[in-house]
Image (spheres, rainbow, N blue to C red):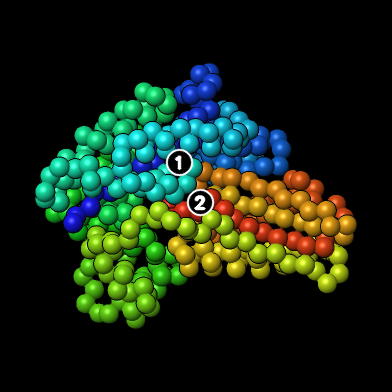
């Protein structure tokens, strides 16, 4: 049986909630995060702020320099989670099978709601449902969503990555191979930095190059090779994840002797960040929340975290945010017995690499 999959992505979610709740912010460059006068990072940015180059995980001082008229708003994670629950409840009411992959993103399998008996006809039939869902979210929640439609998760997500806010895109079965041809190989699910570099060394820059490659891709991508070829032709048999999945990844170290030596602590964090990054990439996930954990000699244990709108996978990003949290919260005020680093809010990372300034 053929499938019809929606990928739903709330537009600039954190910032849009702030603009909705505070009408004075509408149309302004809203930056969710600490103000540029304080040590902090950007958690999210409105589309007005993104035009100036402001991105998640960017230091607030850099965002303030790029966007001097930006309005900085402290994040309200509880508010965003409450809003996410309302939206996902509304989405589930359609009767679709739902896989929520983050606070503002979900896959919907609407195959059972389509009446047509031929793949492309079913995809076209689903467009009216997508329009109704977008309109209902806008009417009932005063927020906008982008929905992209395909026969599988790969196509629906790729269409979303290339769509404008409040968009609606459909990739038909007859057009999918041609649609994929000009895209960079990094656009395909599962292609990270290492695989991308290996493909580039072989002269494979685009998905079209993958489609035309006559050899066995296992020589370039190992056991992922056969799956990579399927993805290049728009084939993806992954089901929606409805059961248990990885919720978090973490690591911690108990020191033989309590220490506040910065070199020791930095080396510990770098090792943990590298390990977590490797595990994220192995599972083809990105993290939206970074958390540090410290324990003192009296066994007092503290955790602090920060949540971002864009996902992170690279060790340098995880390490830098961990150091930021330790410094902001003044957690190394005395020797540590234990130091830990963890990530949560896991989902498929966006195809584009995060650029830090």
Residue 210 is drawn in which quadrant?
bottom left
Residue 311, labelled with which disc? 2
Distance in Å between CA atoms under marks 2 and 1:
12 Å
Residue at horizontal 71 percent and vertical 42 percent from the top? 39
Q: Earlier in the sequence, mark 2 or mark 1?
A: 1
Residue at horizontal 58 percent and vertical 64 percent from the top? 276
Q: Is residue 39 left or right of residue 82?
A: right
Residue that label 1 marks: 104
Residue 298, labelled with which disc? none
Residue 332 is drawn in which quadrant?
bottom right
Residue at horizontal 75 percent and vertical 61 percent from the top? 339
Percent across and percent down for residue 340 are: 70, 60
Q: Does 27 appear above or below 5?
A: above
Q: Quadrant of the N terminus?
A: bottom left
Label 1: state its secondary structure.
Answer: loop
Q: Dot 2 surroundings within 10 Å: few (below 14), some, or many (20 or more)? A: many
On the question of residue 131 being in view, the answer is: yes
Of the pair 288 and 60, the residue shown nearer to us: 288
* Mark 2–mark 1 CB contact (< 8 Å): no
Percent across and percent down for residue 228 are: 31, 68
Q: Does 34 appear above or below 214?
A: above
């Amino acid at each position: 049986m053929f499938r019809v999959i929606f990928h739903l992505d709330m537009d600039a979610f954190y910032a849009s909630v702030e603009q909705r709740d505070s009408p004075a912010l509408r149309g302004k460059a809203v930056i969710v995060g600490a103000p540029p006068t304080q040590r902090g990072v950007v958690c999210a940015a409105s589309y007005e702020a993104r035009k100036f180059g402001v991105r998640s995980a960017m230091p607030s001082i850099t965002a303030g320099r790029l966007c001097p008229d930006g309005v900085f708003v402290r994040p309200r994670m509880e508010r965003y989670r409450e809003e996410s629950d309302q939206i996902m409840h509304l989405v589930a009411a359609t009767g679709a099978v739902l896989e929520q992959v983050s606070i503002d993103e979900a896959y919907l399998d609407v195959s059972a709601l389509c009446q047509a008996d031929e793949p492309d006809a079913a995809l076209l039939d689903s467009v009216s449902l997508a329009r109704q869902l977008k309109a209902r979210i806008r009417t009932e929640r005063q927020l906008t969503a982008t929905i992209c439609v395909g026969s599988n998760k790969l196509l629906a997500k790729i269409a979303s990555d290339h769509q404008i806010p409040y968009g609606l895109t459909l990739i038909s079965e007859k057009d999918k191979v041609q649609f994929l041809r000009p895209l960079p190989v990094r656009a395909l699910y599962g292609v990270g930095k290492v695989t991308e570099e290996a493909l580039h060394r072989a002269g494979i820059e685009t998905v079209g190059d993958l489609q035309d490659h006559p050899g066995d891709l296992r020589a370039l991508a190992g056991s992922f090779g056969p799956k990579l070829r399927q993805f290049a032709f728009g084939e993806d048999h992954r089901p929606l994840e409805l059961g248990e999945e990885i919720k978090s990844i973490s690591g911690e170290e108990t020191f033989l002797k309590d220490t506040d030596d910065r070199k020791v602590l930095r080396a510990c964090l770098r090792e943990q960040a590298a390990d977590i990054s490797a595990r994220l990439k192995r599972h083809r996930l990105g993290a939206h929340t970074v958390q540090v954990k410290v324990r003192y000699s009296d066994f007092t244990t503290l955790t602090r975290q920060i949540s971002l709108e864009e996902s992170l996978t690279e060790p340098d990003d995880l390490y830098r945010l961990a150091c930021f949290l330790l410094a902001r919260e003044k957690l190394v005020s005395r020797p540590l017995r234990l130091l830990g680093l963890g990530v949560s809010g896991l989902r498929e990372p966006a195809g584009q690499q995060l650029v830090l300034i």
